[in-house]
Image (cartoon, grey):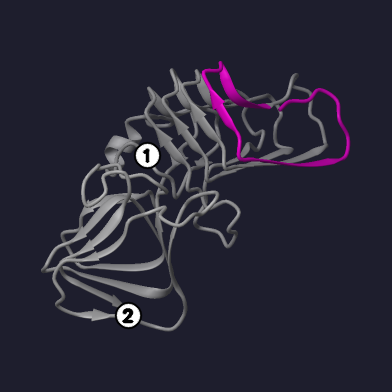
Amino acid sequence: MAHRYHSGTSRINVTNCYFIKNCVGIRIGRYGNSPLYALYDIKVSGYEFESNFYALSFHGGHVSHINSVFKRNKLKNSDSSNIMIFVPLKSVGLKLNLGNLENNDTIDDGMNHILGSVWSIYNFSYDTIYAQGNLWDYQDSTLIDSKIYDDNENPALGKVDFKYFYRAGRIDRDLIVKGKFLISGDIIIPESVKLKIIPPAEIIFAKNFDILRQGNDTSKAELIIYGDLKIEGEGKTTFTSDGFIKEKGDFYGIVFKEKKEMKL
């Protein structure tokens, strides 16, 4: 997706496509560095990218007029970087949104699966890139960051903000969940631990995916309760998947191993 001359406003929504073994799955940007004043709103969702050199490439000079939002996509096994950002000019106002859970919008809630490449994101720009609420190769922030090229590797560059990532594994202390809780593999609540959910809340499981490959179904995530589960407060609590198209059986469900205390 690129342009050289254009005036006016374009709103582009692209959904539910599959790219495999290309140089680039999607390239967004423009040719030339002269400022333009047209506006592009680009929303990409439901895409699957596999074994490309780059899954997503964002290149350009003056690109402040290109608003790009990526949500509920699957990017995996790119030869170089799943997401390559190359905007080498300062103060251009890069507007690339891979997930922002700190605003009131729901159109940019992340839930992208970014897996299995040399670099998850290579940020060669001077802007902060929001990549919150996504599923990575790891559940540890240090390990996630080790596959992101940003200001840690080059202090002159912008930061990639990847907070609120998916979780999996054993929870060793009492946990209170508000808002969204993203699950990439089996979550285990031991006998001595309490899980409290305060509505309104969404418990969101990765669709047909278990990063740990454990439990009753090694291909689907589950919430396994040995301890206590409480839902306290007014409002709706939803257990759902992150699928662009949601289907029955997207995740295994909730498994109660030993009932000590349960309030729903």
The correct choice, above or below, for 209 with respect to 189 in the image is above
Relative side of 135 to 173, left or right: right
Which range of residues does the magenta coloring cover?
A: 1-28
Q: Residue at x 63, y 36 (%)?
A: 94
The correct choice, above or below, for 58 with respect to 106 in the image is above
Relative side of 124 to 69, left or right: left
Which residue is farthest front? 248
| Amino acid type assigned to the residue bearing label 1 in the image | Trp
Q: Is residue 87 visible?
A: no
| Amino acid type assigned to the residue bearing label 2 in the image | Leu
Other residues around mark 1 within 10 Å, as few (<14) / some (14–19) / many (≥20): many
Residue under pointer 1: 136
In the rendering, at what x and y percent does residue 111 appear? 47, 48
How far is the residue under mark 1 from the one under mark 2? 31 Å
Among the 4 quarters of the image, the one containing residue 189: bottom left
Other residues around mark 2 within 10 Å, as few (<14) / some (14–19) / many (≥20): few
Front residue of 149/110: it is 110
Among the 4 quarters of the image, the one containing residue 7: top right
Residue under pointer 2: 264
Tell me which numbered mark, 1 or 2, is placed earlier along the sequence: 1
Among the 4 quarters of the image, the one containing residue 31: top right
Q: Quadrant of the C terminus?
A: bottom left
The correct choice, above or below, for 105 with respect to 3 in the image is below
**In the rendered structure, does residue 109 fall within the stretch colored magenta?**
no
